């Protein structure tokens, strides 16, 4: 990954409100469908987000489940991302641990966290590092704990078309990005010593709106238009039936959604393979 791409990207982003994320963010909705928050006892549940970016979704978890024994650590290699995450934490009055660290070399002992998750991170790696990231994240998950990965879906045609169009026009903002199929995601979980438990997807219909919005604005404003970010399409998404979208996400999301995710349970990783 090229850190400069992400420093520039996160410098351009504004602060976010966790209440809006909790209420209407599809990405957060997928995270909540996948995650299991074990609040049966009084023991603190330790959460790690790898490649936190703005950190807003982990902060939303802390806000929505405040009063429960939940503690979060957010790491990123981009100083701009960590600065934004800190501003979001301060603005929303939420406490979290922020740390500059590399997902391929996590500065934690093995089996430290109950839940480790990443969103929009693993697709930016290729070759041996693509598998190594899964193994390193699984290393710091406690036995019986959860590993949750959310990534772009290689089977989602509108996403692939929009990505290719932006790349050809020199307006793709996210550096190298190789999406996953649900099959690759499941395979890498298993090879990292994690048993797949639940999969899900999001933005089945909204991915079409993203593509149409891109093409429409291309006609209206010409080649200097900035790249479309899915997070900027909330108004379009609200015009469509939220209930219909959620039904599609539940039924065909893992194949047709813009993003897919999987939750796995940590098992014995002694036999995991790095290639």
Image: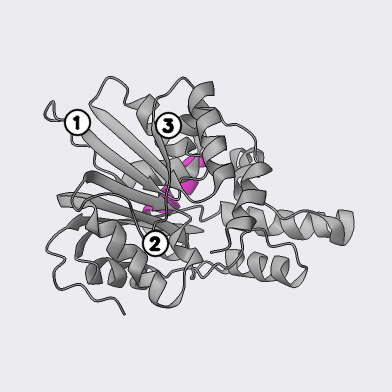
In three-dimensional space, the C-alpha distance between marks 3 and 2, rounded to whole angstroms, equals 24 Å
In three-dimensional space, the C-alpha distance between marks 1 and 3, rounded to whole angstroms, equals 17 Å
| Mark 3 and mark 2 residues within 8 Å of each other at the beta carbon | no
Q: Is 151 situated above or below 23?
A: below
In three-dimensional space, the C-alpha distance between marks 1 and 2, rounded to whole angstroms, equals 32 Å
Mark 3: give few (<14), some (14-19) or many (20+) Cα within 10 Å: many
Q: Position of residue 103 (x, y in %)?
A: 39, 56
In this figure, what is the number of numbered marks? 3
**Quadrant position of residue 32:** top left
Q: Position of residue 168 (x, y in %)?
A: 74, 72
Q: Tell me, yes or no, if residue 233 can be seen here.
A: no
Q: Earlier in the sequence, mark 1 or mark 3?
A: 1
Residue at image x 30%, y 61%?
136
Of labels 1 and 2, the one closer to you: 1
Q: Tell me, yes or no, if residue 232 can be seen here.
A: yes
Q: Which residues are magenta?
A: 242-250
**Quadrant position of residue 91:** top right
Mark 1: give few (<14), some (14-19) or many (20+) Cα within 10 Å: few
Residue at image x 40%, y 41%?
74
Of labels 1 and 3, the one closer to you: 1
Q: Earlier in the sequence, mark 1 or mark 2?
A: 1
Of labels 3 and 2, the one closer to you: 3
Q: Is 233 part of what is drawn in magenta?
A: no
Give the quarter of the figure containing the C terminus. Answer: bottom left
Q: Position of residue 19 (x, y in %)?
A: 49, 25
- Considering depth in this image, is 182 or 54 the residue closer to the camera? 54
The label number, if any, that marks residue 60 in the structure image? 3
Q: Is 72 situated above or below 146?
A: above
| Mark 1 and mark 3 residues within 8 Å of each other at the beta carbon | no
Residue tagged by mark 2? 254
Q: Position of residue 128 (x, y in %)?
A: 39, 76
Secondary structure mostly seen in magenta is: helix
């Amino acid at each position: 990954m090229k850190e400069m791409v992400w420093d520039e990207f996160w410098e351009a982003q504004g602060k976010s409100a966790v209440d809006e994320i909790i209420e209407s963010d599809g990405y957060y909705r997928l995270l909540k469908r996948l995650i299991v928050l074990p609040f049966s006892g009084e023991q603190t549940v330790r959460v790690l987000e790898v490649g936190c970016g703005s950190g807003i979704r982990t902060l939303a978890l802390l806000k929505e489940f405040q009063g429960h024994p939940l503690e979060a650590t957010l790491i990123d290699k981009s100083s701009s991302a960590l600065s934004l995450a800190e501003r979001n934490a301060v603005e929303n009055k939420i406490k979290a641990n922020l740390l500059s660290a590399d997902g391929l070399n996590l500065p934690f002992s093995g089996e430290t966290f109950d839940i480790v998750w990443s969103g929009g991170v693993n697709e930016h790696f290729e070759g041996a590092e693509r598998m190594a990231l899964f193994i390193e994240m699984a290393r710091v998950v406690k036995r019986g704990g959860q590993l949750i990965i959310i990534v772009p879906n290689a089977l989602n045609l509108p996403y692939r078309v929009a990505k290719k169009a932006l790349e050809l026009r020199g307006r793709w903002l996210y550096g190298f990005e190789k999406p996953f199929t649900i099959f690759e995601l499941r395979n890498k979980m298993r090879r990292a010593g994690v048993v797949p438990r639940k999969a899900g997807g999001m933005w089945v219909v909204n991915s079409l709106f993203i593509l149409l919005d891109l093409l429409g604005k291309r006609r209206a404003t010409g080649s200097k238009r900035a790249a479309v970010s899915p997070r900027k399409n909330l108004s379009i998404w609200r015009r469509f039936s939220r209930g219909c979208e959620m039904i599609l996400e539940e039924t065909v999301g893992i194949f047709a959604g813009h993003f897919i995710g999987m939750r796995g349970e940590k098992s014995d990783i002694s036999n995991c393979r790095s290639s």
